[in-house]
């Protein structure tokens, strides 16, 4: 089949996840055209530069700006506004290139990316959604998810609901599996790169810390107050500062430090959290303020006993977490790791349905971690599911 594949460029989790799916599609003999924005474009271009039957095309996408551990909404707005004219022109040119190239996609797959979705919508091509964000809107959550943040949850839910509405089917990747409340929705375990699948858990004494804001100058002094050995990624340099080893980024080095870590301390990004849960590494999650999807991940992480959720990163919080990692490790023993076979089976089933011009499947036959099983909620009746 000819497949148009859209990858959102904000954060690298979408790119690493899409790389796994793209490898499977190419191995199955499909022809793929990828449209991707941001840092993800360089990543995927390098990974597939010698592969046949795949083209990587850069498009413009929205991005977020950060101030400390929070999303700077005002700065993000004006930055995107400034880049909008050039971005629109680039996307119009990309649209024309795809439309005029003779590629003629038969199906669209989107990892929370709108350009490919609208291309599919405009050409009446089925769109398959593969991402983790849709868990917010397409699953039913208990009160602990909203708790004191009901408004944040509702805003996030509304934003996700407006993204990729009316897709042919939604494959939702997650390490927690709440009841599915909407048709055409199937839960799958975390989509994992081969390096993680091949890793074997060997707990050591060091604590892996992943810091996304290199400007955080208080982190190293804070870590130095604690009686643990830390391996810190994300500061943009390497070296040794007391009990803190600063590590330059290396994919193999990072996975090795993760599989042998006593615990991991990081933000609320889904990809690293899914890898940590898969490898049974306890995690302290400090989500970005203004990113409720990250907070949702962290709340489930804590509820399941796999780790802890904190709003700020300080010495007492880290010390309390690190003293409780044995309990987290015990809870993680109940989590059954999965490889990507479940994902591949579901993708193949959906592509076969599209090829046979089957109607949108309410639920899929291939093994999964949860699917729709019941009548729609009142709000869904007669609307876009």
Image (cartoon, rainbow, N blue to C red):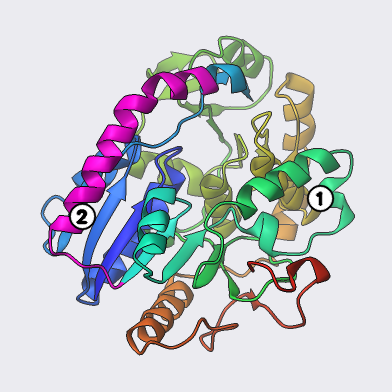
Whether residue 91 appears in magenta in the rendering, the answer is: yes
Q: CA distance from mark 2 to mark 1?
A: 41 Å
Residue 68 locus on image (x, y percent):
60, 17
On screen, residue 257 versus residue 351, left or right, reads right
Residue 87 locus on image (x, y percent):
33, 31
Query: Looking at the image, is 347 positioned above or below residue 79?
Result: below
Give neighbour class at mark 2: few <14, some 14-19, many 20+ (Cα, 10 Å): some
Look at mark 1 in the image and give the residue it sits on: 145
Tell me what residue is drawn at x 37 percent, y 40 percent.
253
Circles 2 and 1 in contact, beta carbons < 8 Å: no
Q: Earlier in the sequence, mark 2 or mark 1?
A: 2
Classify mark 1: helix, strand or loop: helix
The quadrant holding residue 18 is bottom left
The quadrant holding residue 46 is top left
> Camera-side residue: 120 or 48?
120
Tell me what residue is drawn at x 53 percent, y 22 percent.
77
The quadrant of the image that shows the N terminus is bottom left
Q: Which residues are magenta?
A: 77-106
Query: Looking at the image, is 118 positioned above or below residue 285?
Result: below
Tell me what residue is drawn at x 27 percent, y 33 percent.
89
Classify mark 2: helix, strand or loop: helix
The quadrant of the image that shows the C terminus is bottom right
Q: Count every numbered label the image shows and give the total.
A: 2
Tell me what residue is drawn at x 44 percent, y 59 percent.
192
Query: Which one is in front in this view, the residue at disc 2 or the one at disc 1?
Result: 2
Q: Is residue 19 visible?
A: no
> Camera-side residue: 32 or 203?
32
> Which label is found at residue 98?
2
Q: Is residue 9 visible?
A: yes
| Magenta residues, dominant SS class | helix
């Amino acid at each position: 089949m000819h497949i148009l594949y859209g990858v959102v460029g904000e954060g690298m989790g979408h790119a690493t996840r899409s790389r796994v799916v793209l490898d499977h599609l190419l191995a199955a003999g499909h022809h793929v055209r990828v449209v991707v924005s941001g840092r993800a474009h360089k990543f995927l271009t390098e990974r597939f530069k010698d592969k046949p039957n795949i083209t990587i095309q850069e498009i413009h996408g929205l991005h977020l700006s950060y101030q400390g551990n929070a999303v700077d909404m005002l700065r993000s707005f004006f930055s995107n506004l400034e880049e909008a004219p050039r971005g629109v022109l680039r996307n119009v040119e990309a649209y024309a290139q795809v439309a005029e190239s003779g590629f003629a996609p038969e199906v669209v797959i989107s990892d929370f990316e709108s350009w490919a979705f609208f291309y599919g919508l405009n050409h009446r091509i089925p769109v398959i959604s593969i991402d983790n964000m849709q868990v917010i809107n397409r699953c039913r959550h208990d009160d602990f998810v909203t708790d004191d943040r009901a408004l944040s949850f509702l805003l996030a839910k509304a934003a996700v609901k407006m993204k990729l509405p009316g897709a042919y089917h939604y494959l939702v990747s997650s390490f927690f599996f709440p009841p599915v409340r909407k048709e055409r929705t199937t839960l799958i375990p975390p989509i994992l790169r081969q390096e993680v699948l091949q890793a074997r858990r060997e707990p050591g004494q060091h604590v892996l810390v992943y810091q996304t804001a290199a400007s955080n100058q208080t982190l190293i002094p804070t870590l130095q107050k604690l009686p643990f050995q830390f391996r810190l990624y994300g500061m943009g340099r390497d070296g040794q500062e007391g009990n803190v080893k600063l590590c330059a980024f290396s994919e193999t080095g990072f996975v090795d430090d993760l599989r042998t870590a006593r615990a991991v301390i990081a933000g609320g990004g889904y990809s690293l959290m899914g890898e940590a849960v898969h490898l049974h590494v306890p995690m302290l999650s400090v989500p970005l303020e203004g990113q409720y999807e990250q907070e949702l991940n962290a709340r489930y992480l804590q509820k399941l006993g796999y780790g802890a959720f904190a709003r700020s990163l300080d010495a007492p919080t880290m010390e309390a977490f690190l003293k409780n990692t044995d309990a987290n490790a015990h809870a993680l023993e109940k989590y059954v790791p999965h490889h990507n076979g479940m994902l591949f089976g579901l993708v193949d089933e959906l592509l076969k349905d599209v090829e046979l011009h089957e109607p949108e499947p309410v639920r899929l036959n291939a093994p999964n971690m949860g699917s729709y099983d019941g009548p729609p909620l009142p709000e869904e009746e007669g609307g876009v599911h």
